[in-house]
DNA sequence: TGACCTTGTAGGAACGTTAATACTGGACGT
DNA sequence: ACGTCCAGTATTAACGTTCCTACAAGGTCA
C-alpha cells in the first residue's frame, strides 16, 4: 500500500536550503548554535514545504511517545465519559496525546488493552480496572516499572491511584437517610458482580453505626447500571413484603429508574419513599423530583490523577512507592430525600 | 530520563537463541521459510523473555501506525460519547487503536488536533467538525490524500461523511407536531452559533410544507446544549406573548430542560405544550413525561463510518471521489407529544 | 562432474529522527 | 606567525523493525 501523499522530511528541507539534515533539525528545534539568519532560512523553507515532524521517528530515538493510554470499562457510563474528557484535556494541555480503549468490563479485554498500549510504547497508563480485586496484572505492570495510575482502588491496592472514596460517599448518603428518620433502607447496587463492594460497605457502615439491622432482602443487584435496570430493581425491592422507606442507588441512572418506578406506581417521593443516588449527573438535579446525590469534582480527580501519572512518567529510574489518594465526596440533598417541612 | 524498565528486543531473542535478528523476526511473524522447529525455539525464547514487539519501530518502517484519530467537539454530549465508544470498539475489532482529541468547539483547537494527529502519522481520521460551514482545512487534508471521514456534514461537503440526516430528523419531528394539530411550534436550537443549521432547515421545511408561517419569535438559541439551557430557553419561549403550543428541541437534554420548565410552571405535557427532542437518549424514555424523540442507530453510523474510513486507508494511490452517506432517522412518539385519547 | 535449484539463514540498508562527535575557517592572543 | 579557541556546520551512529538480497550446504539432473 502506498500512501500516495507526499511526505516532507528533514532531508527535503536540507536539500532545498543546502544545509545538512542535522543543521535543519537543530535549527527547527531552536538550538542556539545555529545563527538566527540560518534558522530563519530553514524555518521559512520548512513552512513553505509544509513540514510536520514525524513523531514516530522522534519517539523511536527519544524512547518516549508523549502518549498516555486510558483504559475505561465502559464509556456509556456518563461519569466515565466526563472523566475521559477531563483527562484528555488535562493531558493535551501538557503535550500528551490520549490513546483509549474500553475493556467492556472483561478482564481479558483489559489485559489485551494493556498489552496493546505497551506495544505502542505509551509513556504511562490510566486505568479504570474492571474490579478492585483483580489487580495482579496491574501490580506486575508496576513492578516492571511502567507508570500506572488507577482511577478506582482500595487504599491498599499496591498501585498508585486517585479516586473518590466510594465507601465514604455511600456512607454519607445512607447516613443522611437514617438522619431523616428512615429505618428500613434499601440499596440498589451491582457491586457484587464487579468486585467493587465499596458502596455496599459504606451502606453497611452507616447501618451499623446507627444500630440498624442489615437485611439481605433490602439489597438488590440491578444487573446493569442503566435506568431500566434501576426501574427493575426498584420493582423487586418494593414488591417484597417489608418495603423500604428509603432507597440508596449506586448511581444516578439507577436512581432515576427507581424514581420512575415510584411515578408509575403512584408513590410520592420523598413522602412514601426517599431516594438518593451517586455521581450527581446533570439529570439528577433536573429529574421529576430533584435527586439527592453524592457529588464530587471530576476535574479534581482527573487533575490529581494526571499530575501523579506525569510525576511517575518523568521519574528517573525506579518508581517511588505507590500512593493512593482518596477524595472525599459530598452529599447534595435535594427533594428526593428531604422536603423542607415534610417527614 | 531513563525508563528503568528492561526493553526486550528482537536482538535479545537473537542473542539467546543464536539465530540472527532477521531469522527471529521472520519466525515470529510465521514466515514459511523458517522451519517449524526453529520457529518453536524462537517463539519459546520470545515468550520466556516476555517479548512485545515495538509498534513504534514497526510503524516507522511500514509507514502505517494502525492508529485512527478521532476528533470530537465535546465529549460531554452523551450522543458523542456513545459514538466514541462504538467507534473505538469497531476499530479495535479491526486491529486499529483510537487516538482522541476534543476541539471544545473551537476551530483553532480543531486544527491543532488535526496537526497533532498528522504529526503522529495516524492512518486516518474521523472528525466531528465544529461547523459544517468551516471545512476548508479538512478539504485541504483530503486533497493531500489523507483519509478522513466526517461524522456531520452536508451532502455537498466535498469530503467523505457518514452521518444522520439531521434536517430530515427535525422535519419528521416538526411534521409530527403539525400532524397532531399544532400551529404555533417553537424551536430550541443553538445551530446558529455552531454553523449547523440542518435542524432549523428541517423545521422550516415542515412549516412551509404545511403552509404555516415562520415566526422568528418562536426560535430561541439556548446558548448551550445542557438541561439548564433548555430550561432557560423554554422560559423565554413561554414568557413572550403568542406562546407556542408545541416545542421542538434540538437535543434531548434541552428537551428535558423544557419539560422541567413545564413541571415547575404547572403546565401539562402534552395537553398544554407538546415537546419533542432529538437523539433519543436513555433518559428520554424515562423522563417525567416520556419524551418523543428522533432516534437512530448509533452503531449503524459508526460501522459505516469506520468501514468507509478503512476503505480509504487501504486504498492505493489517490483517494476515490468523496461519498456522503446520510442516514434517515426515525421518530419515536411518546407521551410528551401525544397521548392516546387526548388532543 | 558441474550447472542449477532449493532450503535455511544471515547481512545490510532503510524508515525519519536525534545525539555525539568531527571537521572547517576565521578571530584572537602573544 | 603560530597555536588556540570558537562558531558554524557536517558526518556518523544510533533507535527497533522490516525488506531486499546474499550466500552456504545439500539435492537433482543431464
Image (cartoon, coloured by chain):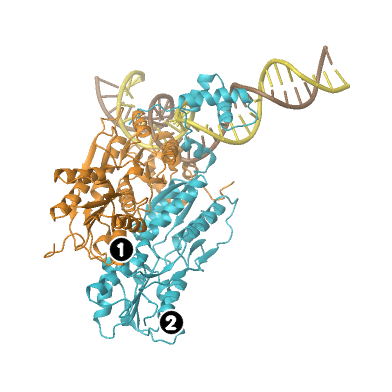
Chain colours: A cyan, B orange, C yellow, D brown
Image disc number at residue B260 = 1
Disc 2 and disc 1 on one polypeptide chain: no
Q: Is residue B99 visible?
A: yes
Residue B76 position within the rendered picture, expressed as x and y whole percent measured from the top left = 38, 54
User: Is label 2 or label 1 in front?
Assistant: 1
**Is B174 placed left or right of B145 in the picture?**
left
Q: Residues within 10 Å of mark 2 (few under 14, many from 20)?
A: few
Question: Count the marks: how many?
Answer: 2
> Which one is nearer the viewer's eye here, A43 or C21?
A43
Give yes or no for contact between labels 2 and 1 (Cβ–Cβ under 8 Å): no
Quarter of the image with the C terminus of chain B in it: bottom left
Residue B46 position within the rendered picture, expressed as x and y whole percent measured from the top left = 43, 48
Please determine whether, in this image, residue B193 is positioned above or below residue A235: above
Residue B169 position within the rendered picture, expressed as x and y whole percent measured from the top left = 21, 48
> Which one is nearer the viewer's eye here, B254 or B110?
B254
Question: The residue marked by circle 2 belongs to what chain?
Answer: A
**Furthest-front residue in this view:** B241
> Which one is nearer the viewer's eye here, C25 or A207?
A207
Q: Is residue B51 visible?
A: no
Q: Which residue is mark 2?
A: A179
For label 2, the SS is helix
Please determine whether, in this image, residue B296 is positioned above or below residue A215: above
Residue C20 position within the rendered picture, expressed as x and y whole percent measured from the top left = 64, 34
**Is B315 placed left or right of A323 in the picture?**
left
**Is B121 placed left or right of A23 in the picture?**
left
For label 1, the SS is helix
Q: Could you say which quadrant of the image residue A275 lies in? A: bottom left
**Is D2 placed left or right of B52 in the picture?**
right
> Which one is nearer the viewer's eye here, A265 or A171?
A265
* Structural distance between the alpha carbons of marks 2 and 1: 29 Å
Q: Residues within 10 Å of mark 1 (few under 14, many from 20)?
A: many
Question: The residue marked by circle 1 belongs to what chain?
Answer: B
Amino acid at each position: 500500500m502506498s500512501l500516495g501523499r507526499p511526505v516532507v522530511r528533514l532531508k527535503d528541507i536540507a536539500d532545498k536550503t543546502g544545509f545538512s539534515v542535522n543543521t535543519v533539525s537543530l535549527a527547527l528545534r531552536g538550538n542556539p548554535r545555529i545563527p538566527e539568519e540560518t534558522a530563519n532560512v530553514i524555518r521559512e523553507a520548512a513552512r513553505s514545504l509544509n513540514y510536520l515532524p514525524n513523531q514516530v521517528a522522534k519517539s523511536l530515538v527519544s524512547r518516549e511517545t508523549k502518549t498516555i493510554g486510558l483504559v475505561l470499562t465502559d464509556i456509556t457510563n456518563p461519569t466515565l465519559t466526563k472523566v475521559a474528557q477531563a483527562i484528555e484535556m488535562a493531558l493535551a494541555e501538557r503535550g500528551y496525546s490520549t490513546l483509549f480503549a474500553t475493556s467492556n468490563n472483561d478482564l481479558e479485554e483489559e489485559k489485551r488493552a494493556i498489552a496493546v498500549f505497551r506495544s505502542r510504547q505509551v509513556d504511562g497508563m490510566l486505568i479504570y480496572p474492571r474490579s478492585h480485586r483483580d489487580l495482579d496484572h496491574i501490580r506486575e505492570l508496576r513492578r516492571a516499572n511502567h507508570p500506572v495510575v488507577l482511577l478506582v482502588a482500595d487504599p491498599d491496592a499496591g498501585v498508585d491511584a486517585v479516586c473518590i472514596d466510594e465507601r465514604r460517599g455511600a456512607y454519607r448518603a445512607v447516613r443522611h437517610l437514617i438522619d431523616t428518620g428512615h429505618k428500613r433502607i434499601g440499596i440498589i447496587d451491582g457491586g457484587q458482580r464487579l468486585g467493587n463492594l465499596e458502596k455496599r460497605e459504606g451502606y453497611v457502615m452507616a447501618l451499623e453505626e446507627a444500630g440498624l439491622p442489615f437485611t439481605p432482602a433490602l439489597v438488590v443487584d440491578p444487573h446493569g447500571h442503566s435506568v431500566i435496570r434501576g426501574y427493575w430493581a426498584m420493582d423487586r425491592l418494593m414488591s417484597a413484603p417489608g418495603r423500604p422507606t428509603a432507597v440508596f442507588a449506586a448511581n444516578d441512572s439507577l436512581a432515576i429508574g427507581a424514581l420512575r418506578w415510584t411515578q408509575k406506581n403512584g408513590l410520592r417521593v420523598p413522602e412514601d419513599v426517599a431516594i438518593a443516588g451517586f455521581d450527581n449527573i446533570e439529570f439528577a438535579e433536573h429529574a421529576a423530583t430533584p435527586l439527592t446525590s453524592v457529588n464530587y469534582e471530576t476535574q479534581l480527580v482527573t487533575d490529581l490523577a494526571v499530575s501523579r501519572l506525569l510525576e511517575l512518567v518523568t521519574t528517573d529510574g525506579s518508581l517511588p512507592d505507590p500512593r493512593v489518594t482518596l477524595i472525599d465526596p459530598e452529599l447534595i440533598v435535594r427533594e428526593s430525600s428531604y422536603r423542607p417541612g415534610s417527614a
